[in-house]
Image: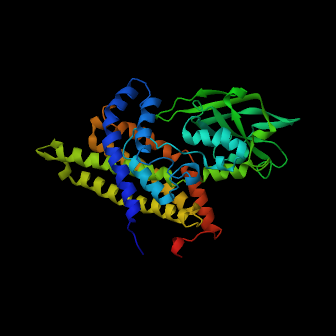
Amino acid sequence: MDFDLSAEEREIRDWVRTFVRKEIVPLEPQVLERERRGERGLSAEELKTLQDKARSSGFFGIQTPESHGGMGQGAVVAALIEIELGRSFVPFRFAGEADNILFSATEEQQETYLGPTIEGTRRSCFAITEPGAGSDARAIRTSARREGDEWVINGEKTFITGGHEADFVMVFAVTDKAKGADGGVTCFLVDRDRGWTSTPIDTMGEWGPAALVFDDVRVPHSAILGEEGKGFELAMRWIGKGRYMLPARALGSCERLVEMGMEWARNRVTFGEPIANRQAIQWMVADSAVEIEALRWLVLTAAWQVDRGLDSRQSQSMAKLYGGVKANEIVDRVLQMHGGMGYTRELPVERWYRELRLLRIYEGTDEIQRRTIARNLLKGHASVRGHLG
């Protein structure tokens, strides 16, 4: 059993680590200042400049197949990269990615949507969540009725990531009420100029979702992504594309936060000595270190299973649940270690406090992950002995 990284994995990890330290971390004071003014932390132009710099070194489309111009890396490498990116709160991502279900598009659709999305000239969003259908994706009410060679879409979607910036949407609508999620939901590719509108939703963090409204939006039959009635399968494929990536980024954040906490504790003197000498602080550091290490192996185990074609859903749910809960506990400890300064917006601790709270909600709430984990165990689909049996 080998717990080490391969030479290639280590080389990629180290390059990203250096890139984050040299190119991204120095931007943090400016990003914090902008966000305090209610401005965007990183402009589109600045993001593209960073992405182009990374692309010049070959970092483009981490998991995008080589046939589409990407690096074609697997899940473990993707997780290692996400951990390093998580060490900064600056909203950077490597260019060259596209929603996994867009690879199911026809050749014509790939030319119109997939290729431009990979190249960054078009922006997509995934729209299934509705005001009355969050965790229960089967309860969607947005409908599409066929009129000749066209479909007419009506409904509302909410909390759509990138929904206000996207120029096309992958929207899921009921096309057969009798069948519902079992063969009656279809996915449509809909350009913004077809008439759907979006409104930003203000949140406690820097995540900026949107509400989308479809009012008699007409699209041709050729706008269907995949097969008619098979949309729910596509939606589940999108949702399950890599829940290990969310706790992976949180893992990087936790590493950086605890390092910040330890540095503060070494230098903050009370009653004549550094607070790092206080047992209360030492226990916070110790507990956080243990939880970070446990999360690391939950994330990497899930990614390892994905790379080997194993059923990784149970492991991903465990990583997502544990990552969300422990990341929130760790950032809370680090804020406490900083005292009043941790509560200010001068330091990024408060920002991370708000950002990491989202991890327990989106892409499957804690409660949904617990439901999935317990159901798999009780039905015999998984074992408490784990994948080693």
Q: Is residue 243 above or below residue 90?
A: below
Q: How is the image coloured?
A: rainbow
Residue furthest left as drawn: 272
Considering depth in this image, is 88 or 200 the residue closer to the camera? 88
| Residue 253 appears in the figure | yes
Considering depth in this image, is 284 or 353 the residue closer to the camera? 353
* The N terminus lies in quadrant: bottom left
For the point 52% across and 29% down, the residue is 202
* The C terminus lies in quadrant: bottom right
Q: Residue 279's quadrant in the figure?
A: bottom left
| Residue 127 appears in the figure | no
Q: Position of residue 46 (x, y in %)?
A: 42, 32
Q: Is residue 165 left or right of residue 41?
A: right
Considering depth in this image, is 102 or 318 the residue closer to the camera? 102
For the point 30% across and 53% down, the residue is 284
Q: Position of residue 242 (x, y in %)?
A: 55, 54
Q: How many labels were placed on the picture?
A: 0
Q: Is residue 123 left or right of residue 4?
A: right
Q: Position of residue 44 (x, y in %)?
A: 47, 30
Q: Is residue 375 left or right of residue 273?
A: right
Q: Position of residue 60 (x, y in %)?
A: 48, 46
Residue furthest right as drawn: 148
Q: Is residue 126 left or right of residue 17?
A: right
For the point 53% across and 71% down, the residue is 387
For the point 67% across and 38% down, the residue is 112
Residue furthest top as drawn: 37
